[in-house]
Image (cartoon, rainbow, N blue to C red):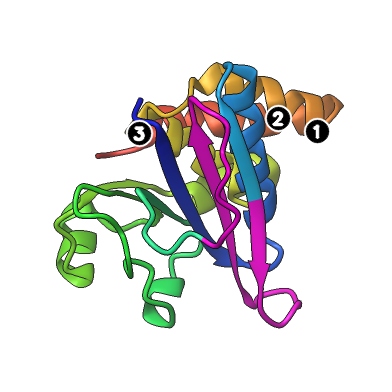
Amino acid sequence: MKNLTEVKFFGRGGQGVVTAAEILAKAVVSEGKWAQAFPLFGPERRGAPVLAFTRISDKPITIRSVIYEPDIIVVLDPTLPKVVDVKAGLKHRGIAVFNSKKTLEEIKKEMGFKAKVATVDASRIAIDILGRPIVNTAILGALAKATRLVEVQSIIKVITEIFHGELGIKNAKAVSRAYEEVKF
């Protein structure tokens, strides 16, 4: 792993964007790395666009600013690319992880991506397993496999510590299923 990896999450209020960034940070810390996670809010209401960020390093992190040039973007809401330029600043060899029913080729063509793209239908997985379209845990499974940034078991461990009982079990299943279904 290089010294610093920056991840930018895009979603809408109520989708668990901030929680996803925090879970990722806790999972990499459990693996002995350094991390920080933080949100950026606009109008604080359900459905409004929300950004969250995670920095990961093998050394202490001293930067305390918004991430403008991420190594990885994670798009939780498939409608956001129509209203937000999610690829702005993505590094040349960056990775984009999308919650989408579309194929890799469709996304690359629509977005004009040259970066590595990964897709998973996290919405379907969340509805099937959780009964609600809260995709944050499923998208983390896809992120783990597409980037190899963190072990999927580390994410599952953090999730079962945060979400107790049946909710933790269901979210762990969503992570595992997305890990298996992601295409890249």
Rendered location of residue 122, percent (x, y): 49, 48
Q: Check whether the beta carbons of the residues at disc 2 and disc 3 lie within 8 A of each other.
A: no
Residue linked to disc 3: 147
Per the image, label 1 sits on a secondary structure element best described as loop
Residue pictured at 70% horizontal, 31% vertical: 170
* Distance between mark 2 and mark 3 Cα atoms: 19 Å
Q: Which of marks 2 and 3 is nearer the N terminus?
A: 3
Magenta span: 38-66
Q: Quick one: 118 or 181, which is closer to the camera?
A: 118
Residue pictured at 51% horizontal, 36% vertical: 56
Q: How crowded is mark 2: few (under 14 residues within 10 Å), some or many (20 or more)?
A: many
Question: What amino acid type is highlighted by mark number 3?
Answer: Thr
Q: In this view, does 96 lie to the left or right of 7?
A: left
Q: Is residue 70 inside the magenta stretch?
A: no
Q: Which mark is residue 159?
A: 2
Quarter of the figure that contains the C terminus: top left
The reply to whether residue 115 is visible in this rendering is yes
User: Which of labels 3 and 1 is toward the front?
Assistant: 3
* Distance between mark 3 and mark 1 Cα atoms: 24 Å
